[in-house]
Image: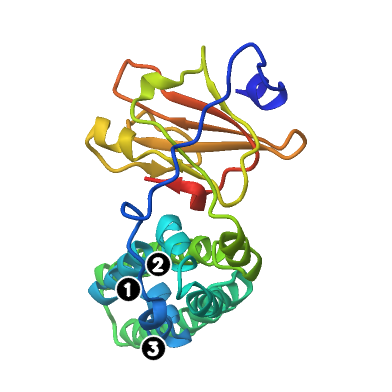
């Protein structure tokens, strides 16, 4: 993998060609993003991070992800309503920028800690009262076990809040003013892969001059494996995992997708930075 990140293009073979530009009749239908802004209020975002597993939070996250896919954003900023939609998307991006999300996450965690501290203070008082009243050792041990369970539950809540914040931040990163303006000027190119055998570690295909607006379409791989693809930091051995490696020094990315057990993964070498928002899964 490191050799791929460090080496230059293999000029002995042609680069991966982008998909043909869609005709007007086949383009993604333009959507109106105006209804998203009232949904993504500061309070709703904080509530989503506080209770990411609630039905309301799941529905909000799923709808936001479904409506703000790279291809749909691209479609929104093109056409006769493109400029108006672009302004709405930029406003949503400001709500979802990393500084705002980090601030909301910190405030949410602080509130969670304050509430738990009050609860623990009350419980400690009850424990002391029981001790003075001759409470049993079983009762004391039970309270200690509850404290350990509370600590584990708090860590789980913090982890879920971090994941929710990252999900929102990933969406927001595609809606910065610069990115939206670039999408208005340049629709970007799409490179599709339909089978893990199309590009392997031994014979990787190369995508050259990859830009921030370009897309790597892996939906064909998802269809081949018949399971959702999941972006991970490290492979676990399961199929359907997507890993992105990037070298800042060479400005080169390697995108890998684990395939069926016993078969080599898809490995694509990309000259340019591939981010999560560039993937179509």
| Residue 215, above or below 44 | above
The residue closer to the viewer here, 270 or 183, is 183
Q: Is residue 111 left or right of residue 225?
A: right
Decide: few, some or many residues near mark 2? Use Cα within 10 Å; few <14, some 14-19, many ≥20: some
The residue closer to the viewer here, 79 or 212, is 79
| Residue 193, above or below 94 | above
Contact (CB < 8 A) between labels 2 and 1? no
Res. 49 image quadrant: bottom left
Residue at the spot of label 1: 60
Residue 111's label in the rendered image is: none
Residue at the spot of label 2: 157
Q: Tell me what residue is drawn at x 45 percent, y 63 percent.
A: 73
Contact (CB < 8 A) between labels 2 and 3? no
Instruction: Give the CA distance from mark 1 to mark 3.
Output: 35 Å
Quadrant of the rendering where the C terminus is positioned:
top left
Q: Is residue 184 left or right of residue 79?
A: right
Looking at the image, tell me whether mark 1 or mark 3 is earlier in sequence order: 1
Residue 122's label in the rendered image is: 3
Res. 20 image quadrant: top left
Q: Is residue 175 left or right of residue 252?
A: left
Quadrant of the rendering where the N terminus is positioned:
top right
Looking at the image, tell me whether mark 2 or mark 1 is earlier in sequence order: 1
Looking at the image, tell me whether mark 2 or mark 3 is earlier in sequence order: 3
- Callout 1: SS: helix
| Colour mapping used in the image | rainbow
**Residue 161 at least partly seen:** yes
Q: Tell me what residue is drawn at x 49 percent, y 72 percent.
A: 82
């Amino acid at each position: 993998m490191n050799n791929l990140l460090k080496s230059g293009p293999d000029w002995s073979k042609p680069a991966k060609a982008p998909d043909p530009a869609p005709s007007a009749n086949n383009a993604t239908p333009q959507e109106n993003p105006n209804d998203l802004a009232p949904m993504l209020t500061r309070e709703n975002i904080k509530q989503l991070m506080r209770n990411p597993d609630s039905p309301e939070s799941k529905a909000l996250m799923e709808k936001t992800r479904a409506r703000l896919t790279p291809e749909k954003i691209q479609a929104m900023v093109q056409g006769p309503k493109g400029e108006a939609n672009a302004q709405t998307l930029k406003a949503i991006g400001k709500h979802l920028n990393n500084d705002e999300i980090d601030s909301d996450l910190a405030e949410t965690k602080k509130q969670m800690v304050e509430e738990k501290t009050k609860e623990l203070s009350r419980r400690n008082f009850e424990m002391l009262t029981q001790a003075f009243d001759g409470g049993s050792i079983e009762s004391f041990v039970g309270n200690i076990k509850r404290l350990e369970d509370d600590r584990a539950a708090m860590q789980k809540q913090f982890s879920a809040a971090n994941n929710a914040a990252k999900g929102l931040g990933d969406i927001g990163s595609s809606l910065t003013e610069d990115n939206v303006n670039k999408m208005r000027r340049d629709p970007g190119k799409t490179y599709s892969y339909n089978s893990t055998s199309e590009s392997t570690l031994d014979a990787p295909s190369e995508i050259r001059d990859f830009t921030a607006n370009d897309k790597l379409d892996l939906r064909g791989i998802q269809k081949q494996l018949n399971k959702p693809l999941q972006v991970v930091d490290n492979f676990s051995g399961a199929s359907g995992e997507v890993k992105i490696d990037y070298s800042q020094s060479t400005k080169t990315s390697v995108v890998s997708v684990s395939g069926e057990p016993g078969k080599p993964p898809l490995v694509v070498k990309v000259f340019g930075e591939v981010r999560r928002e560039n993937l179509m899964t």
